[in-house]
C-alpha cells in the first residue's frame, strides 16, 4: 500500500477511512484515495463496454475511462503512445507487435487470485491435457515472459504474464441461410463461383490472411507448414488465388469495421463472409436470418487480454491489479459469455448466469427458455442450440489462431497489392 | 533610417504568420521527408538513412497502378465538378436577377454541407445497393430485370461520391469571379453582335479562369489526398494513394507511409505548378 505523495492534510481528512483500511489486508486501497483514481483503458469495441466501466465504479469505486478503437488503431496506440493509457485491452496477436516496444509491463501471476482457474489454452496452450496446440499465434506462446523486464516470450508458465486473458472466441464464416438455401460445410464455399459478387472478407491483413489460408487449405490448393507463420512462397500462392478470385468479381466488398460487416450482411449485399460473433447477433436482432456457420476444417480463433502500461506504478498499479482480479471474478465473464464470447475463467462466470444461459452458451444444450443478450435483445428461442455446440466442441476445434508472422512485413505489402489489384 | 524602421515593422507584421507556418506547416513536412528515409520493422523505426522505402515504392507495379487510379479519380471528378459547378455558378450569377434570390439559392447549395462528409458519403450506400432505392425504382419502372451491381462498390460510386462531396468547392470560387465580371463587358459583346455562346467562350470563360483554377486546385488536392471516400464507396475494392498511406500507417509502417506521402506531395505540387502556368492567380485576383 502506497502512501507516497499524500500530504498530512489529506491523510487527516481521510483519517477514519485510513484507520479502517489499515485494519484490512493488503490489496485493499483507501476508500477516499481510490475515488480519485482514473484508469484509462483502450481496446477494440468487442470488450470495451460502457457497462463494464459503470460496474467498476459501482464495485471498486474508481473510474475507468474506456476508448474503443479498431484493431489497427489499438496496435498503433499501444506501440506508440505508452503514456496515453493505463490498461491496454489487446488481442494476443497484437501482443507480438507491441511487447517488443517495451510499453507494457509483465504481471505477477501470484497477485491474480483466479490464476489457477484460467483455462489451459492461455497457460499450457492445451484446452484439455491431450489436445493439440493450434497453428498461429496461440495465446500461450506470447503469454509469458521470463521476468518483470523480459522482452522475449517464454515457452511455458513463468509467473509473469504479458496479458491477463479475458475474452476469446472461435471464429468462422457468417452466412445468410435464407439467401443461400443449402447447407454450407467448408471454408471453400467462400470462393465458390456460385456466390460471385456476394462474398466478402475483412480488410485487416493479419486476420484476413488467416481466413484466406483456411480457404486455400480446404480447397487443397496449398499445404501450409504453419498457417500462422507462412513462408514467402506460401504468401504468394495464397494471394495469387485470392487475387484471381477478386479479378473474377468474387467479392462484393471488403470490410474493416464491425458495422460495415453487419450492414453488408443485413442489406443482402453479401451472403457469405468472414464475420465476428456479435456482428451475427446484430444482424439477427434486425430480424434477419444469419448463421455463424461451423465448418468442417475448424475455426480461426482469437483471444484478448488486459495488459498494463509500463508507466503504471504505486497506487494506480494496485488499482489495476484490483481491476484485473475483479474482471476475472465473474461479472464481466458472465456478460461476455452472454454475448457469445468465452470468459478466461468460465467457472466464475457461471455464478452470474442462469442455468439456462450457462447450458446454452457453455454446454451447448438446447435453451430451456428465451436467450437474451446482456442488453436485452432476444437472441434465441427455447429449444434452439448454439451454433457449433459446447465450449469444448468449439474451442477444441480450433485450426489456427490469428497471427503475426515472421514475414509479416512482406505479407502486408502483398496485402496492399491484393487490395489495389 | 526610415527605411530600416519600415523594414523592421514589415518583418514584425509578417512574423506571427511566419512562425505559425514554420511550426505547423514547414516543420511537419520536413519531419515527414526525414522519416521517409528511415527504415522500419514491425515494431521499431530505425533512424538511419536509407533509400529502401523509395526503392520499394518505385519498384512496385502497384505504386504506378495506384497513382494511375488516383489521377483517374482526380481527372474525372475534376471534369464533372467543373461542368456542374460552372453551370450552377453561371445560372446563379447571370440568370438570377435579384440579389436576395442569388443569396438564397447560393445558401441552398450549401445546405448539404451542414452534415459531415462521412454521413453524406455513407447515405449513398443504401441508395445504390443491390436492394437499394435506385435498383428498386429501376426494376419497378421495368427499365431493368436484374439489380445493377455496378452502382455500388465500383469506380462509379467512388466518383459519384466525390462529385457530390466536392462540387461546391467549384461553385463558390467560380461564382465569386463571375460576380466580379463587369456587366458592361457582356453588354458590349452583345452590342458587337456576339452570340450567347461567343460571349461565353470569349468573355465569360477567360474572365472566370481564376475561379476555375482555384476550384480546380481545391478539387484536385481534396481528391488526390482522399482515402476514406475511396475506401467506403468502393467497399475497399479499389485503392488510391491516400489508401496506400493510410494502410501503411495502420500497420505501423511510418517511414514507408512518409515516403509515399512525399511522392504524393511532390506530384500534387507539380500538378498545381503546371496549372499555375496557365493562369496567374495573383494577377487576376
Image: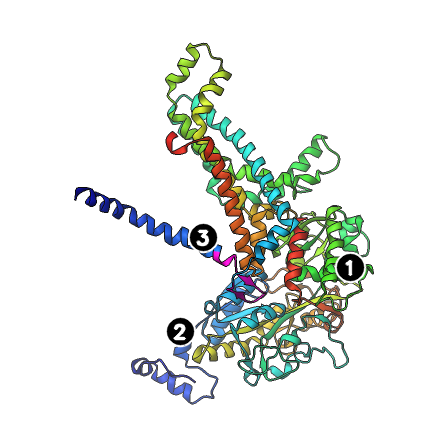
**Element type at marker 2?**
loop
Query: Residue visible at 45% across and 73% down?
Result: A62
How far apart marks 2 and 1 lie (CA) works out to 53 Å
Residue identified by numbered label 3: B29
Disc 2: CA contacts within 10 A as few (<14), some (14-19) or many (>=20): few
The residue segment tinted magenta is B34-48
Magenta highlight: main SS: loop
Label 1 marks a residue whose chain is: A
Q: Can you give x and y, in whole percent of width and height, for residue B281 in the image?
A: 41, 33
Label 3 marks a residue whose chain is: B
Residue identified by numbered label 2: A36
A79 or B133, which lies in front?
A79
Looking at the image, residue A151 lies above or below residue A293 = below
Q: Nearer the viewer, mark 2 or mark 3?
A: 3
Quarter of the view holding residue A168: bottom right
**Element type at marker 3?**
helix
Residue occupying the far bottom of the picture: A23
Are the residues under marks 2 and 1 on the same chain?
A: yes
Disc 1: CA contacts within 10 A as few (<14), some (14-19) or many (>=20): many
Looking at the image, residue B233 lies above or below residue A64 = above
A222 or A289, which lies in front?
A222
B34 or A99, which lies in front?
B34
Disc 3: CA contacts within 10 A as few (<14), some (14-19) or many (>=20): some
Residue identified by numbered label 1: A216
Image side of residue A7 versus residue A313, left or right: left
Q: Can you give x and y, in whole percent of width and height, for residue B273 in the image?
A: 47, 38
Give yes or no for contact between labels 2 and 1 (Cβ–Cβ under 8 Å): no
Are the residues under marks 3 and 1 on the same chain?
A: no
Query: Residue visible at 45% across and 77% down?
Result: A316
B71 or B8, which lies in front?
B8
Amino acid at each position: 500500500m502506497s502512501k507516497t505523495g499524500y500530504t498530512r492534510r489529506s491523510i487527516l481528512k481521510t483519517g477514519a477511512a485510513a484507520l479502517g483500511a489499515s485494519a484490512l489486508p493488503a490489496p485493499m486501497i483507501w476508500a477516499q484515495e481510490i475515488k480519485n483514481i482514473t484508469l484509462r483503458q483502450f481496446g477494440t469495441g468487442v470488450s470495451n463496454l460502457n457497462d463494464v466501466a459503470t460496474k467498476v465504479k459501482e464495485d471498486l469505486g474508481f473510474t475507468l475511462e474506456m476508448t474503443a478503437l479498431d484493431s489497427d488503431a489499438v496496435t498503433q496506440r499501444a506501440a506508440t503512445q505508452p503514456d496515453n493509457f493505463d490498461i491496454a485491452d489487446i488481442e494476443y496477436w497484437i501482443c507480438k507487435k507491441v511487447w517488443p516496444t517495451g510499453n507494457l509491463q509483465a504481471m505477477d501471476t501470484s497477485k491474480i487470485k483466479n490464476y489457477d482457474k484460467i483455462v489451459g489454452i492461455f497457460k499450457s496452450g492445451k484446452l484439455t491435457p491431450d489436445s493439440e496446440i493450434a497453428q498461429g499465434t496461440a495465446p500461450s506462446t506470447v503469454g509469458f515472459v521470463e521476468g518483470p523486464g523480459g522482452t522475449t516470450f517464454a515457452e511455458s508458465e513463468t509467473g509473469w504474464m504479458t496479458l491477463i486473458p479475458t475474452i476469446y472466441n472461435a471464429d468462422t464464416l457468417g452466412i445468410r441461410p435464407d439467401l443461400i438455401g443449402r447447407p454450407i460445410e467448408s471454408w471453400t464455399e467462400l470462393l465458390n463461383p456460385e456466390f460471385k459478387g456476394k462474398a466478402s472478407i475483412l480488410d485487416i491483413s493479419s486476420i484476413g490472411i488467416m481466413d484466406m489460408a483456411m480457404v486455400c487449405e480446404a480447397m487443397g490448393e496449398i499445404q501450409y507448414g504453419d498457417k500462422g507463420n507462412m513462408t514467402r512462397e506460401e504468401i504468394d500462392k495464397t494471394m495469387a488465388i485470392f487475387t484471381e478470385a477478386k479479378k473474377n468479381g468474387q467479392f462484393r466488398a471488403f470490410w474493416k469495421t464491425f458495422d460495415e460487416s453487419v450492414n453488408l450482411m443485413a442489406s443482402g449485399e453479401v451472403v457469405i463472409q468472414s464475420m465476428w460473433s456479435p456482428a451475427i447477433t446484430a444482424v439477427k436482432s434486425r430480424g434477419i436470418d444469419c448463421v455463424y456457420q461451423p465448418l468442417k476444417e475448424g475455426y480461426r480463433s482469437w483471444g484478448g487480454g488486459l495488459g498494463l502500461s509500463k508507466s503504471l506504478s504505486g497506487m494506480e498499479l494496485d488499482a489495476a491489479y484490483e481491476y484485473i482480479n475483479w474482471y476475472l471474478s465473474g461479472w464481466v465473464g458472465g456478460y461476455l459469455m452472454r454475448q457469445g464470447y468465452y470468459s478466461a475463467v468460465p467457472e466464475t462466470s457461471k455464478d452470474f448466469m442462469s442455468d439456462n444461459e450457462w447450458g446454452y452458451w457453455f454446454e451447448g444444450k438446447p435453451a430451456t427458455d428465451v436467450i437474451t443478450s446482456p442488453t436485452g435483445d432476444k437472441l434465441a428461442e427455447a429449444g434452439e442450440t448454439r451454433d457449433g455446440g459446447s465450449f469444448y466442441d468449439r474451442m477444441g476445434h480450433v485450426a489456427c489462431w490469428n497471427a503475426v508472422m515472421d514475414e509479416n512485413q512482406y505479407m502486408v505489402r502483398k496485402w496492399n497489392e491484393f487490395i489495389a489489384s | 533610417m526610415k527605411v530600416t524602421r519600415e523594414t523592421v515593422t514589415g518583418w514584425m507584421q509578417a512574423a506571427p504568420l511566419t512562425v505559425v507556418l514554420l511550426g505547423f506547416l514547414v516543420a511537419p513536412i520536413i519531419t515527414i521527408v526525414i522519416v521517409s528515409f528511415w527504415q522500419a520493422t514491425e515494431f521499431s523505426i530505425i533512424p538511419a538513412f536509407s533509400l529502401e522505402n523509395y526503392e520499394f515504392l518505385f519498384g512496385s507495379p502497384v505504386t504506378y497502378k495506384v497513382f494511375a487510379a488516383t489521377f483517374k479519380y482526380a481527372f474525372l471528378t475534376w471534369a464533372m465538378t467543373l461542368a456542374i459547378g460552372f453551370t450552377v455558378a453561371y445560372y446563379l450569377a447571370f440568370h438570377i436577377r435579384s440579389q436576395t434570390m442569388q443569396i438564397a439559392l447560393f445558401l441552398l447549395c450549401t445546405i448539404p454541407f451542414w452534415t459531415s462528409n462521412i454521413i453524406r458519403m455513407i447515405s449513398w450506400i443504401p441508395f445504390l445497393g443491390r436492394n437499394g432505392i435506385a435498383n428498386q425504382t429501376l426494376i419497378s419502372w421495368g427499365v431493368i430485370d436484374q439489380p445493377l451491381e455496378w452502382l455500388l462498390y465500383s469506380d462509379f460510386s467512388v466518383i459519384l461520391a466525390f462529385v457530390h462531396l466536392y462540387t461546391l468547392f467549384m461553385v463558390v470560387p467560380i461564382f465569386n469571379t463571375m460576380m466580379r465580371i463587369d456587366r458592361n463587358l457582356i453588354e458590349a459583346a452583345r452590342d458587337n453582335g456576339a452570340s450567347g455562346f461567343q460571349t461565353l467562350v470569349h468573355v465569360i470563360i477567360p474572365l472566370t479562369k481564376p475561379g476555375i483554377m482555384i476550384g480546380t486546385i481545391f478539387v484536385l488536392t481534396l481528391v488526390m489526398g482522399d482515402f476514406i471516400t475511396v475506401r467506403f464507396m468502393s467497399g475497399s475494392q479499389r485503392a488510391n494513394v491516400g489508401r496506400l498511406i493510410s494502410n501503411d500507417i495502420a500497420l505501423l509502417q511510418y517511414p514507408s507511409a512518409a515516403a509515399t506521402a512525399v511522392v504524393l506531395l511532390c506530384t500534387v505540387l507539380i500538378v498545381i505548378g503546371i496549372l499555375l502556368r496557365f493562369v496567374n492567380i495573383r494577377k487576376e485576383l
